[in-house]
Amino acid sequence: MLALKYHQAWNVGLQQVEPLSCIEPDDVVVDIAVCGICGTDVGIITGSYPVAVSGTTLGHETAGVVAEIGSGVTQFQVGDRVVVNPTYFCGHCRMCQIGNPNHCERKFGTEAGVSYDGAFAGQYLAKENLLIKLDDHVSMEEASLTEPLSCTLTGVDKLGITHTNIRAVVAGAGPMGMLYIWALYERGVKAFMVEKNESRMQFAKDNLPPECQLYSDFDTALMQEYGDQSTLIDLCVDTTGQLTEYVFDHLAPGGKLLNVALKDKHASLDIMKIADKSLSVIGSIDSLNNSFERAYAMIRDGVIPVGRLISQTFAFKDYQQAFLIVGCDLTAKAQVPLNTPNCKVLIRISDLK
């Protein structure tokens, strides 16, 4: 079967690998239908997020069909349509025991698409407890957004939202930004969005929640929303990693800044202001507190219309074109400006439905 292998920055490509088989009793081999491109994949390829192990198969936002089950598997059978939770946790280390399984101390060697072979391949070797059986009406494409939505719910949980009439903004109209603005909307918060890339804006403007507005810069947004660009805001989700200092200076007392961008960037913050204004600067990553199961339920029940956020789907052989859409030019080995309206880009690994 084919797998998209990472070797080093800008050195990735399709290669033939052996089909997978169950080893442990709780193993499940999944034939992959579709896998989404994540910002993590782009960061690994470009070298801006140098975490992947050479020789690893990339990809972790995926769904497919059970092809083989281990001797101890009881919840699934061959032919079941499933979505894969790629966030392994041992359940026994200190991080798992104190409620942080997303930072499991045994993550190395188990993290899909980073240190463990991921899902840009014909098959993926999963664990029984990390699969959910799909309802018939949920497409493989929709199911593949369960993982990024679960990461979004983890972050929204950390915000501890108790009031809906707050001033809120989401920075960045990429897949995570769009998922966050919809997740906030589901909690009763009508945030506005800031995005400067015209291609991302073009897609986002038609796919925002009702009454949520889109702007090209913060000052204009504050003026249009509140009539004064010095207005302080209560909540900002920054998916870009570029706006920490700006947003920090615009937080109202009790304000919260959630950063979910994996960017190698540093910011200077006023410690006095953090204490004096009761400010919170929060980070979030991966699935936590049953967020994967909750994310699937929201997709299943149509609470968040993830299908609207899928902008393009490419065949596996056209993976280079798929990555180019998100600004990753594998041929030129360079990041390039986004020039096509896009949000979540998927790669179809097979014709499984």
Image: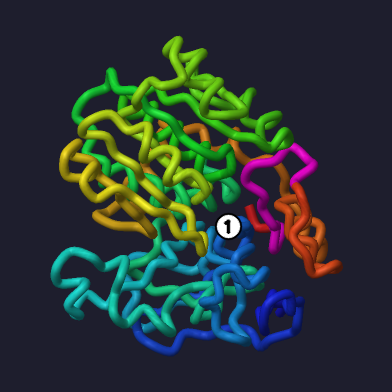
Residue 110 rendering spot, x and y as whole percentages? 42, 80
Which image quarter is the N terminus in? bottom right
- State the residue at coordinates (45%, 39%): 246
Left or right of 20, for residue 148: left
Give the residue pinned by disc 1: 39
Asked if one can make out residue 345 in the rendered structure from this viewpoint, the answer is: yes
Task: Give the image quarter of residue 99.
Answer: bottom left
Vertical side of 201 occupied by 103: above or below? below
Q: Residue 262: say if magenta.
A: no
Vertical side of 196 occupied by 261: above or below? below
Vertical side of 288 occupied by 189: above or below? above
Inspect the image, locate mark 1, and give the three-letter code of the amino acid beneath it: Gly
Left or right of 235, for residue 267: right
Vertical side of 25 occupied by 259: above or below? above
Callout 1 crowding tier (Cα within 10 Å): few <14, some 14–19, many ≥20:
some
Asked if one can make out residue 319 in the rendered structure from this viewpoint, the answer is: no
Can you name the residue that lies furthest to the top here? Answer: 227
- State the residue at coordinates (54%, 52%): 144
Colour scheme shown: rainbow
Left or right of 89, for residue 56: right
Q: Which residues are magenta?
A: 338-351
Residue 220 rendering spot, x and y as whole percentages? 55, 20
- State the residue at coordinates (72%, 33%): 198
Q: Main secondary structure of the magenta part?
A: loop
